Amino acid sequence: MNSDPRSALAALIAALERHYEAAAASRDDDDPALDAATDQLTTAFDNYDDALFDAYDIATPLIVFDTDEDDDEDDDDDFDDLDDLDDLDDDAIDDDESDEDDSGTDVR
């Protein structure tokens, strides 16, 4: 993995360009060049997302979905993770609301 977010971003942009070129040249979904470009794009995105998080504690708002039928069970875990994050956001909102009194003024 590339731990520098700027380098990882450059690699992601290059992978997006390669994927576009493969998609534009492809005649069907089973094109090996398109499959390879898709795999490279997925890897580049994961590397960028990890590097960004490691450097700045920020994640991208994107999820890579795997089209392999064997991994369908793992996809459910992705949605569970999103539900957990949503629950954390709801808890943070509830905490903020409890800091206000009935008149709506901040009591901090």
Image (cartoon, helix red, strand yellow):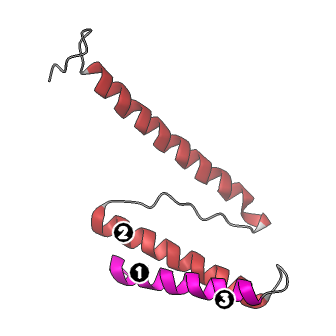
Up/down of 43 relative to 76, above or below: below
Q: Is residue 15 magenta?
A: yes
Q: Position of residue 46 (x, y in %)?
A: 50, 72
- Determine the residue positioned at 61% across, 88% down: 18
Mark 3 Cα-neighbour bin, 10 Å: few <14, some 14–19, many ≥20: some
The amino acid type found where label 2 is placed reads Leu
Query: Magenta segment, which residues?
Result: 1-25
Residue named by callout 2: 52
Q: CA distance from mark 3 to mark 2?
A: 26 Å
The mark found on residue 8 in the picture is: 1
Name the residue type under label 1. Answer: Ala
> Would you identify the image quadrant in which residue 71 lies?
bottom right
Q: Position of residue 17 (x, y in %)?
A: 57, 85
Q: Is residue 70 visible?
A: yes
Label 1 vs 2, first from the N-terminus:
1
Label 3 belongs to which residue?
21
For the point 14% across and 24% down, which residue is it? 108
Sequence-wise, which precedes: disc 3 or disc 2? 3
Measured in 3D between alpha carbons, the distance from the residue under mark 1 to the one under mark 2, in whole angstroms, is 8 Å
Sooner in the amino-acid sequence: mark 3 or mark 1: 1
Residue 24, horizontal then vertical, whole percent: 73, 86
SS for callout 1: helix
> At 51% from the left edge and 74% from the top edge, which residue is drawn?
45
The answer to whether the residues at label 1 and label 2 have Cβ atoms under 8 Å apart is yes
Whole-Å distance between the Cαs marked 3 and 1?
20 Å
Direction from residue 67 to residue 4 in the image, left or right? left
